[in-house]
């Protein structure tokens, strides 16, 4: 059996926060506003994996109104969910992600981010791919006010 999962997340960018993508801090003057550490890439991946497996979504696992998840490490949240997905018999075939971000440029960090995600999920780096698109100076993304991510996974049992 195979299943596809789609994950999405978007966060405003704000001063005084770290810009985290896939568990890697990118040097930038703004970071994601969010209840947890704000790593939109890991949040979208978590939702893709949970959706494909039928186990729920990140909000049902870690409700944003619960104080215990304030500033939580998104890598730890993903590991918890991935453990549950694997325990129901699913294996990851591949994961493909699109990051919408005007600045900073993502390409210099891509390999490190893909390797970080592979390490978090304990899979091979060639199972993970991330690419970025700008907002072409248009909308919240293009104006540097937000970052958003779409993630698609293929699971097999």
Image: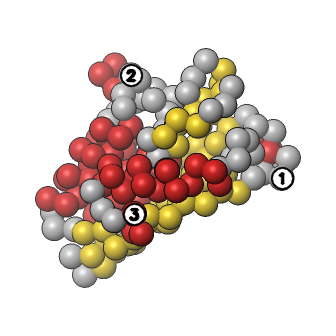
**CA gap, disc 2 and disc 1:** 33 Å
Mark linked to residue 136: 1
Local packing at callout 2 (Cα closer than 10 Å; few below 14, some 14-19, many 20+) is some
Instruction: Identify which residue, 77 or 65, lies in the foreground.
Output: 77
Relative to residue 95, is residue 92 drawn left or right? left
Q: Residue at x 73, y 34 (%)?
A: 145
From the image, tell me which residue sits under label 3.
125
Relative to residue 143, is residue 62 drawn left or right? left
Above or below residue 60? Residue 68 is above
Q: Residue at x 54, y 60 (%)?
A: 130
Place of residue 144 in the rendered image (x, y in percent of width and height, measured from the top left) = 76, 37
Above or below residue 40? Residue 91 is below
**CA gap, disc 2 and disc 3:** 30 Å
Q: Quadrant of the C terminus?
A: bottom left
Question: Which sits earlier in the primary sequence, circle 1 or circle 3?
Answer: 3
Question: Which sits earlier in the primary sequence, circle 2 or circle 3?
Answer: 2
Place of residue 23 in the rendered image (x, y in percent of width and height, measured from the top left) = 44, 41
Place of residue 38 in the rendered image (x, y in percent of width and height, measured from the top left) = 49, 33
Task: Evaluate if marks 2 and 1 touch, with contact meaning CB atoms under 8 Å apart.
Answer: no
Relative to residue 66, is residue 6 drawn left or right? right
């Amino acid at each position: 059996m195979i299943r596809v999962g789609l994950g999405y997340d978007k966060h405003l960018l704000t001063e005084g926060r770290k810009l985290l993508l896939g568990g890697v801090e990118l040097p930038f003057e703004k970071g994601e506003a969010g209840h947890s550490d704000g790593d939109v890439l890991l949040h979208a991946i978590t939702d893709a994996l949970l959706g494909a497996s039928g186990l729920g979504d990140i909000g049902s696992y870690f409700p944003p109104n619960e104080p215990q998840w304030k500033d939580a490490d998104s890598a730890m949240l993903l590991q918890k969910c991935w453990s549950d997905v694997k325990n129901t018999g699913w294996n990851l075939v591949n994961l493909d992600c699109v990051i919408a971000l005007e600045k900073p440029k993502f390409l210099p960090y891509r390999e490190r981010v893909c390797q970080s995600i592979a390490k978090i999920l304990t899979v091979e780096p060639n199972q993970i791919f991330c690419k970025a698109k700008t907002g072409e100076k248009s909308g919240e993304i293009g104006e540097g006010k937000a970052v958003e991510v779409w993630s698609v996974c293929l699971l097999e049992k």
